Image (tube, coloured by chain):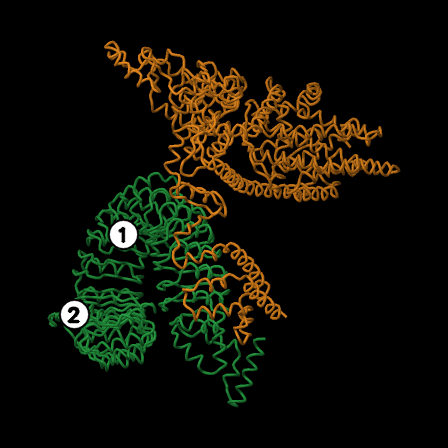
Chain colours: A orange, B green
Amino acid sequence: MKMIALCSSPQPLLREHLLSHLHSSFSFGLFLLHPPKLYFQHRRHKLSVSVSAKSQTCQRDLNVEAVSFVRTLKRLVDNPQLIDLKKPSLCVSMLSLGAPQWLMFAQEASAGETIRLNAIYETGELFELGIQLSYLLLLLALLGVGSFFVVRQVLVRRELDLSAKDLQEQVRSGDASATGLFELGAVMLRRKFYPAATKYLLQAIEKWDGDDQDLAQVYNALGVSYMRDGKTEKGITQFEKAVKLQPGYVTAWNNLGDARDKNKDPNSALKAFEEALLFDPSNKVARPRRDALKEKVTMYKGVPVKPKKRVALMEDLEMDDEETLCAETWLKPSSGNSIPQPNQPSFTNFTLPKDQPACEDPSLLDFGVRIGTSFSKYSLAPDHHGQSLQSNNSNRNQGNVNQQINEALQVGKAQDWDPPAMLNNLSFLEQKIHQLQGMVHIIGVRRGQILQQSDEIAMQQQQMITADLTSIIVQLISTAGSLLPLVKHNFAGPTDGATGQHNRQMSEILCNPGLGLNATNTGESHGRGGPNIPNQSNQAGPTRDTAHSHPLDERELKEEDDADEGENLPPGSYEILQLEKEEILAPHTHFCTICGKGFKRDANLRMHMRGHGDEYKTPEALAKPNKGNGSEAMLLKRYSCPFVGCKRNKDHKKFQPLKTILCVKNHYKRTHCDKSYICSRCNTKKFSVIADLKTHEKHCGKDKWLCSCGTTFSRKDKLFGHIALFQGHTPAIPLDESKGAEGLFEQGQATSGEKTKVAQSINFSFHTGSHNGSGVKNIMDVKGSIDDPCSYFSPINMNSFNEFSGAAFDDPDGGFSFFIPDSCNYDQKNDLDVVLQASEQ
Amino acid sequence: MKKRKIADCGQEQGRELHQNFFNTLSEEIVFTILDFLGDNPLDKKSFSLVCKCFYSIEAVHRRAIRPLRTEHLPKILSRYPNAERLDLTLCPRITDASLVAISSSPCGSSLRSIDLSRSRFFSAGGLSRLASECVNLTEIDLSNATDLRDPGAAALAGARNLERLWLGRCKLITDMGIGCIAVGCQRLKLLNLKWCLGIGDLGVGLVAVKCSELRTLDVSYLQISNKCLPSILKLPYLEDLVLEGCFGIDDDSLSTLKHGCKSLKALDISSCQNISHIGLSYIINRHEGLQHLTLAHGPPVTAPLAASLRKLTMLQSIKLDGCSVTCSALKVMGSYCVSLGELSLSKCSGVTDEAFSFLVTRQKQLKRLDITCCRKITDVSLALITSSCTGLTSLKMESCSQVSKEAFILIGQRCNFLEELDLTDNEVDDEGLKSIGRCSRLIVLKLGICLNITSEGLSHISKSCSKLVELDLYRSSGISESECRACPLITSLGLGVITIGCKQLAKLDIKKCNKIDDAGMIPLAHFSENLRQINLSYTSVTDAGLLALASISCLQSMTILHLKGLTLSGLTAALLACGGLAKVKLHATFRSCLPETLLEHLEARGCVFHWRNKPFQAELDPKCWTMLGDTLQ
C-alpha cells in the first residue's frame, strides 16, 4: 500500500493514524457544529488527505473526503495490530464525541461499504455513491449548523439572563463586590442595556479595590458602553483612562482609535492605532485600520474635510467597529480566569503515568512515553515553558504548519468565542481528569491486591489510561489554543457561574480542538505569542487572590462608603496628610489666634475674627482661603487614617485615601471608636457619630414595617424591596390593624403556617390520586357512590359545623379552636384515598 | 359502586311503582340529557323532581350551584358533592360560619371557583379557612368586599393555587395585603384591582415581581405612578393590561420606559388625563403586537397619532370613545390600519361624513362599529357602511339624528349578520323595522325613544327575529321586557301577558305605569320566578301585590317609592317575607315609622336600605310620547 509505504516506521504510523482519526472526528464535529470554521476545516481536511494520499488523483473535493475514510479503514483492516491500537483511540473519540457520535458511525459505515467495492472503486459508480454520500453529509452538516446556531443563541441568551439576575440580586442586596459589579456591567453590555451597564461599571470603578491594571479593563468596558450608547466623548475619556492605567492595553488603544475615528478625529485615531501596533505589531485590528486612516489623513491633508464623505467612510467602518468592540470586550473574560485553573491539575495528571507502579513495565512505559511525545510534538500548551518542543515541531511539519497558520489566522479573526463554552470545556476536562484519577487509583489498589495479574490486562489498562490522557491533552491544547489570539490582554474576567448543560459542553469541546492545534502553532510563530501564555497565567494569580479576600474587603467598604467618593487617583498624584488621633477627636479644629476660642468650621472662625478688629473685616480676610490660588496648581490633598492596619491608612497596601477632614473624622469615629451615643427611644441602637444618631432618631419607632422573617424596616419601600428579593417572605400585617373578631382570630393566624403546609401536602396527594385514576370523572363517581355525604365529615368537623351554624360568630374563642384541627384534614383525605382505591379496583 | 347504588335504587322503586321506565335509563344517558338542559335553574329543578333516581343523578351531575339563602347552604352543599363553581351572589349574608361550612363540606376540596361579590359579613377567619381547605380553588371573586382589610387579604394568600382573583372596590386593602397575596398566590393569571384605592405603587410592583404568570391585570383607578410600570411591563406573559383612570401615569414616566411588554395584546388607557399624544406614541412604539387598544376619553386623536398606529400591525380593535377626532386622523387610520375588526367612535366630536366614509370604505372587515352620538353623520355614511362593511355584527348608532328614515332600510337590506343593533333616539320608522326584520340573527335590539315606530313595525321584528333576547323600547311605543317606564297606558292585563310569555324576566321597571295594580303582580309573582329587580314606584300596587311579590324567592332589589296604597304593616310583612332582599329603596318617611328592631333584623339578614326623599313628581305631559298599549304576543 502506498500509504503505509509513505509512513516509514510503525511509530509515526500509529501517531498518524491516531491523529488522523482524532482529526477526522474532531473536524467532523467541528464541521457540524461550528459554522465559522467550516471553510477552514474543510481546507484542513483536504490537507490531511494530501499528506496521507499523495498519489491519489482527486477529482472532487468531496470525493476525497470519502476516499480518505476508505483509506483509513483499509489500513486498519490490513494491519490487525493497528485495530488493536485503534481501540483506545476509538475510546477517545467516543468519550469526546458524545452527541454527534452517530454521525461518525454513519460515516464509518459508509466507508465500510466502499471497502467492499474497492476493487472497482475507480469506476464511476463509486463516485456516484460518493457524491450521494457527500451530499447527504453536506445536508446533515448544514442542518447541524442551523440548529447549532439557534440552540447556541438561545442558550447564550438564557445564560446571560440568569447570570445577570444573580448578579443583580447581589447588587440589590448591597453585597456585590467590585468584580461582581464589573461582571454585571459586562453582562448588561452584552445584553445591550447600555445605561445599566454604564451604571454598574461606574459603581465597579467606584468600589474597585484590585489592581490598577485590572481597573483598566473596567474603564475599557465602560468606554465601550458609552460608545455603544452614542456618547462618544465620554467613551474616549474612558479609553484614555484605561490606556493611562495600563499603557500596554492594546484593546483599549484600538477602541480609543476607533472612538476617535468616530469622533472625526483621524489624526489622533491614527496615533492610537499606532500606539496599539507599537505594543502588538501584528494586531489584526489595528493594522488595517491604521493603514486606512493613514491614507485618509494624507488624502485629506490640506483639503477641507467634507463631512458627508467622512460620515460615509465612518459608516463603512461601522460594521467593523461593532465587531471589534464586541470581540475585544467579550473575548477576554474567561481567558484570565478560567484557563489556569484546570491547567494545573491536568499537567500533574499528565505526568502521573510515569510515577505509577504500572509504568515499571518497560514496554508499557515506552508506549506511554511514545504517545506522550507524539502528542507533545503537535502541541505546545501542556508545558508553557517547554520551549524545546518548538523546534521539534517546527522542523517536523514546517510546510504544513505554515499553511495552517495562515488559515488559523483568518479563522481566528472572524471567530466569535464565548466564555461559557470555554468554561464548559474546562469543567468537562476537570471531570474527565477526576474520572481518570479514580480509575488509576483503582488500578493501583488492585495492583497491590492481586499481584499475579496478567500482563495483558495491565497493558489494556495502560492503554486505556494513555488514551484518555491523550484525549484530555488534545482537548486542553485546543482549549488553550483557541484563546491564543486573545491572550495578549490580561484580564481579570468574570467567573461565569454557568454550570451544567452537559449536552452543550460536549459539542463545544468538539468545536475547538481542530482550531486549537493550529492556534497553538500560530501563537508560537508569533514573536510575542509565546511569552504571552505564562504572562496570562501570572496575571490570573492575583486576580483570584483578590476574589478570595473579597468578603473582608467588602465589610470594610460598607463601613466606609460614606467617605469613599469613588475617585481613582493614581498614587502619587496627591499629597497625603495624616492627622493624629487627638487632633481628630478634638471638638474644634479651628482656633482663634487671638483669644484661643475653638471652632468647628473655618467660616465660623472668620466670622468670629471680625470682632477682633477692622483688619479682619475686609473682603479678602473674609473670603474663603485658597480660593484664588488656582486649583490646578495645588497638589490635591488626601487624608490618611492614623489607625495602623486600616485600609484608609497610608501604609496599607490597598490604601484608599479619604477626601476631606470631615471624612477622616467620621471614618475614625465610626470605625475605631466606641459607639457612645445610644438611641433614647429604642435603647438598642448605638452610634459613634452624633449625626448618625440624629438620622436614626428621625425614624426610630415610627412605622415599623415588618416582614414575616422578623426583619423590621423603617420605610415601606425598603420592606417591599426586601420581599421582592427573597422568596417566601411576606409582609406581616400588624395585629392591631385587625380589629374585633379578627383580633381574636390571632390564634388561628399563628398556626396558619402549619395549616398551609398541611393543605399543600393534601393538595399534592389529591392531585396524584386524580391522575392515577381516570381524572375527574373517577372522583366524581367515588363521591356519588356515598349515600350519606356526612361520612366525609369527621366527628370534629361536624361538631364545629353545628356550633357555627347555630351560634353566632361572636364567640370565637370556643369556635375557632375547631377551625384549626389538622386531624380533620387528614381524615378527609384518608377517606378519599380509600375510596379512590376502591374505585380503581 | 355507583352503578350498584343506582341499581339498588332502581329495584326499590320498581317494587314501589312496578313500572318506572325512567329507571331503565342508564346513568350516562341521563348525564347527557342533563348536559343539554339549559341554564334555567328551574328546568333542572323540575328534572330532579321526576323520580328519586333522577334526583340523585342530578345531584351528582351538578357542577355549578347558585344558592339563594344562606340558611340552606349546608343542605345544598351536602346534596351536591361535585360542585365546582359556587356563586353566592344571591346570598346577601355570607358569614364566616358559611365559609367554614363550605370549606368543610364534601365539595370543599373539589371547589374551583367561588363568587363572593355582593356578599358581606365574612372576615379574614372564614377566608383563611376557605383558602386552606379548598385547595383546588382557582377562582375567587371578592369584588365589593368593602369591609375586607389586610388580614383578609393575608388569609387569602393561603390559597396557593389561585389563578383568578377579583378584588374590585376592596378599598381597605393596602399594599401590605396585596403584598401577602402576591407572595402567596404566585400562580395568579388574572388580577383585578379596580378601585382598590388603598393599593399603590409598591403593592402593584410587588405583584408584578412575584406573580410572573399574570395574563390579565386591571389596575384601573389606582394611585399608581411610573414606579411600578416598568415591573408591570416586564411580566413575561401579560396580555391584557387595564390602566383606566390612572392619573399618576404621565408622559414623563412613559418616556423613561425602555422596553415594552412583548406579549401585550390588549391595552386600555382610557381616562388617563395626564397622558398626551406624546406618551401615547411612546407606548405605541414599544408595543407593536397590540391587538386591542382603548383610548377612550384620552387626548385628541390627530393625524400624527393615527399615523403612529400604523406600527401596530396586529391591531384589531380600537376604541376612541369620547375623544376629539380630526378628519385627517380618521383618513390616516383608514389608509394605514391594516384590518380593523372593531371601531368605537362613540361620543367622538369631529367625526364628519367625509372622513368617516373614507374610513369605512377602507376598513371592510369591520365587525363591530359604534358611532353613538356622532351627530354629524348622515345618510351618506350609513349607505357606505352598509355597502362596504357587510359583515357587521354589531352596530350602535344611538342619537345619530341626521340619519333619515330611508337609511335604516339599507341596514336591513345589506347587513344581514347583525346581532346587536342600537337605534335608540333615531328616526327609524315601521318601514325601517320591516327591513331590519331581515336580520334574523338579532339578539339585542334597542329602539328606545324611537318615536316613529308603532306596533306594526315591532310585529315584523317579532315575526322574523326569533333569537331576540333583549328588546329595549324605553319611552317608545310598545312593550319592553326590561323597561316599561312611563307607559301609563299599560295595564295589569298587559303585564300579565308579558310575564306569562317571558318567564326568564330578571329585571322589571314599571315605574310610573300607574295602571298596573295588584292584579298584575299576582301573575308576575307566579310566573317570573327569576325576577331579581323590580321598580314599582308610582304604580298602583298595594299591600296584597307587594306580598305576592315577596314570594319570589330570587328577588333582591326593590324600589318602592310613592305607592299610594301601601301601608306600614303591609310593607313590614312584605319585607319580612322576602328573605333574599339585599337592597330596598324606600321613602324616607318610612324610616321613622318602621320599628327599629325590624330594621336591625333585616340589616343583619344582609339587606341595605336606601332612603330617598324625593317629592312626588307630577306626571309629565303624556302627549309628548305617543303611547300605545298593545302587547306583542
Check disc 1: other Cα within 10 Å, few if <14, some if 14-19, many if 20+. Answer: many
Q: Chain of mark 1?
A: B
Task: Give the amino acid at mark 1.
Answer: Ala
A596 relative to A498, above or below: above
Check disc 2: other Cα within 10 Å, few if <14, some if 14-19, many if 20+. Answer: some
Residue A721 sits in quarter: top left
Task: Give the amino acid at mark 2.
Answer: Asn
Location of residue A450 in the rendering, given as x and y in whole percent from the top left corner: 86, 39
Residue B503 sits in quarter: bottom left
In 3D space, how far apart are the residues under numbered discs 2 and 1 (Cα atoms)?
Answer: 32 Å
A137 relative to A230, above or below: below
Residue farthest toward the top in the current orientation of the protein = A615
The answer to whether residue B440 is seen in the rendering is: no
Q: Is residue A269 left or right of residue B439?
A: right
Q: Earlier in the sequence, mark 2 or mark 1?
A: 1
Q: Secondary structure at mark 2?
A: loop
Q: Which residue is mark 1?
A: B296
Camera-nearest residue between B390 and A605? A605
Q: Is residue B160 left or right of residue A534?
A: left
Q: Which residue is mark 2?
A: B452
Q: Is residue A86 left or right of residue B446?
A: right
Q: Are marks 2 and 1 on the same chain?
A: yes
Q: Is residue A798 left or right of residue B293?
A: right
Q: Secondary structure at mark 1?
A: loop
In the image, which is nearer the foreground, mark 2 or mark 1?
1
Q: How many marks?
A: 2
Camera-nearest residue between A71 and A369? A369
